[in-house]
Image: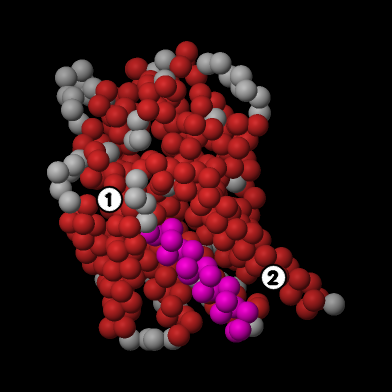
Amino acid sequence: MRKQISNIQFDSFIYFIMHSCFVGISINNLFFISKQNTPISILFAIIIGLIPIYIFLYIMNYKPNLSIIELNQELFGRKIALIINLLLLSFVLSLAVIIFYNLCNFINSQYLYRTPVVLIGIIFAIGIWYMLSKGLPTFARVIMILLYIDLFLYLLSFIGLVGQIDIDNLRPFADEGLKPIMTGSLHYMIYNILPIFLLTIIPKEQMKQDRHFNQHVIGAYLITNLMLFIIAFCTLSILGIELCQLYQYAEFHILKRVSILGFITRVENTLSLQWIFDMLITCAIAVYFLANGIKRIWHPHDNKSEKIIYTILLGIIFILSEFIFPTNTDAYHFLSKIYPFFIFFFFFILPLGVMLKIFYTEKKKDI
């Protein structure tokens, strides 16, 4: 198989996936669960999250030439694997719908409140289709460019906010015990770490240089978590827990306080582009997962059919995102109370089962 992407490009996938559900979803859950102890929850989650990272690396390193779809077929047989893969694809579709909904809702509520959500959705769907239609190598190069822009905007935001941090807004520490902190850690792990499993659709064999693959993944994991920790820390310590719970996108409102060189203000619309990139790229990765999963099950090989699959998938995602949540209250209830269980099952329990099956298969060969 032709090598297509580098380790650093794969790391950028991890970066965008981990960021995508943070804005408007997981950080909102943390503000209501862990409250002012949100940064502590994230620190605990970084440690707990090493478990799914180990499972992810175990699966990726087992058969470098196989994607998760093909690996399931080899481990479980075609009939059982078909059921598992169809359920997995259905779940990834739901994840793509939710991220696409959050992206359109964010743009509509914070940028273009007079623009129909339908128009916003169509524009982003076309953008995703265009990126994916150029193939994985081109898609990876686009992601690298957006990563550099993302990092620049992130650094600019931090410099403009660091002087406004007030540690008193983080007190009292652990006033309700450890339970809210640990619950918040699980929510963070579920939304910001487990979706890395999407990358199992890319066989490790497609890496140009995979000698230090594990180190790259762990490094990207730690750096991205540190960045998310800083975002939560700055948002909470500047706004305070009451305002954080009041705003749907507190991370956007905090950017209104950014002042660069003491006189450059009103830059929040530019700086928040980083979050748009995060959600847009992850939605594209989810569509790539779906399209390649479908191809590997039914084996259509021509590029024309691939573009048709992208078109159909984006059409389904667009339509479902328009009707999935009647109100923001319904969205919050579903995403905080119900959907985490689905993510935990498909992105932790299922990969754990795959890892155990691999372990059992290898052990059986040694006997």
In the image, residue 308 sits, relative to residue 109, either above or below, namely: below
Q: CA distance from mark 1 to mark 2?
A: 40 Å
**Label number found at residue 358:** 2
Q: Nearer the viewer, residue 78 or 258?
A: 78
The residue under label 1 is 104
- Seen in the image, is 9 located left or right of residue 117? right
Asked if the stretch drawn in magenta spans residue 166, the answer is: no
| Residue sitting at the far right | 367
Query: Looking at the picture, how far across and down is residue 256, in whole percent?
Result: 25, 27
Q: Is residue 122 above or below residue 275?
A: below
Local crowd size for mark 1, using a 10 Å CA cut-off: few (<14), some (14–19), many (≥20): many
- Viewer-side residue, 11 vs 105: 105
Question: On residue 71, which mark appears?
Answer: none
Whole-percent x, y for residue 208 in the image: 44, 67
Q: Earlier in the sequence, mark 1 or mark 2?
A: 1
Q: Which quadrant of the structure image shows residue 157?
A: top left
Amino acid at dot 1 = Cys
Looking at the image, the residue that sits furthest to the left is 114
- Position of 151 compared to 265: left or right? right
Q: Which residue reaches farthest front?
A: 326
Question: Residue, x 64% and y 59% (percent of image)?
Answer: 349
Residue at 29%, 62% in the rendered image: 318
Residue 175, x across and y down, in percent: 61, 19
Q: Quadrant of the C terminus?
A: bottom right
Q: Which residues are magenta?
A: 78-97
Left or right of residue 294: residue 159 = left
Residue 124: name its quadrant: bottom left
Q: Look at 27% across and 39% down and name the residue there.
A: 272
Majority secondary structure in the magenta region: helix
Is residue 223 shown to the viewer in this render?
A: no
Q: How is the image coloured?
A: secondary structure
Q: Amino acid at mark 2?
A: Ile
